[in-house]
Image: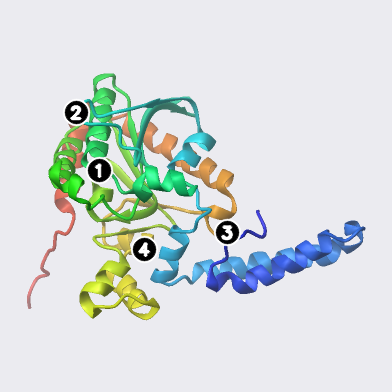
Amino acid sequence: MSTLTSYTLDFEQPVVEIERQIEALRSRGDAAAYAREIGELESTRDRLLAKTYAALSAWQTVKVARHPHRPQSADYMRLMCRDLCELHGDRRFGDDQAIVTALARIGSTKVMLVGHRKGRSTPEKLACNFGCAHPEGYRKALHKMKLAEKFGLPIVTLVDTPGAYPGVGSEQRGVAEAIAVNLREMSRLRTPIVCVIIGEGGSGGALGIGIGDRVAMLEHSWYSVISPEGCAAILWKEANDQTNSIAAKALALTAADNLRNGLIDEVVSEPAGGAHRNPQAMADALGGWIVETLRELRRFKPETLVRRRFDKIRRIGSLSEGAHS
């Protein structure tokens, strides 16, 4: 497990204090002499970390999902894939950097990967619009997914966006229509589709590549019709820690909430303290889950996949009334 980083979440402060003590002991000349003390501090840290992350509020979960060191799509592609070959362009307008598409292998399984790209450095973030895709990004994604269908490749999408890009150019080029077309076409692609919300799952921007046979969320990600800040600004005309926290709880945006409400199929556990503390372990767990899920889905005929996917989507939000006495 990694130790100190340059960014600390407010609720992690007690853990960080213990990690500072561990680092101080390790930095002394004879660290072996302090092995027992270091071991005790590490055990205390791990217990506190597990306790803290087991009781995160919805707003704290959003903060974890936005952690600057949290693994992004590009990190998972590097850590869990091989033979990666990125594909570019929508053959209509341009190559949106906020969406990455690539042919790759996860283990021995050949897949078409589609994911949001946020970027790390400031120039990368600006080039990727902080993970907010334009319509050409969604059209690029759909073009590559249809290519996968043509060659019988399963599709894996990694969702991590605060939402689609809301600028004038994006609207002029039909971002709402592009997302709507993706929803329709993904619902009837004759190949297995696995979708994972790895960080932020904001509104239609997430749904544009989020329709699949299996939809999962990482344990400390969020998925909602609107961000807590957007909700707070609409309801209370002010977004601050208090209103954001109330909004996050009301939106039921955590992985546990979405699983309980039937919007996702599974929650993939993260390493203690979140994926940002051990990206390789998270990539190994995610890659294993994807391979196992695709192995199960490939047992179905294409027409069966489409029918099951359609039925699954139609059941979302359905209600049944109990018998009245």
Q: Identify the disc placed on residue 194.
A: none
Residue nearer the viewer, 173 or 100? 173
Residue 109 can be seen in this image: yes
The earlier-in-sequence mark between 2 and 1 is 2
Q: Which residue is mark 1?
A: 134
Secondary structure under tag 3 reads loop
Residue at label 2?
A: 92
Q: Earlier in the sequence, mark 3 or mark 2?
A: 2
Q: Residue at x 32, y 55 (%)?
A: 162
> Who comes first in sequence, dot 3 or dot 1?
1
Q: Position of residue 5 (x, y in %)?
A: 63, 58
Say if 65 sits above or below 245 in the image: above
> Is residue 110 shown to the viewer in this render?
no
Estimate the spatial distance between the alpha carbons at disc 2 and disc 4, rounded to whole Å.
36 Å
Q: Crowding near pointer 4: few (<14 within 10 Å), some, many (20+)?
A: many
Res. 272 mark: 3
Q: Secondary structure at mark 1?
A: loop
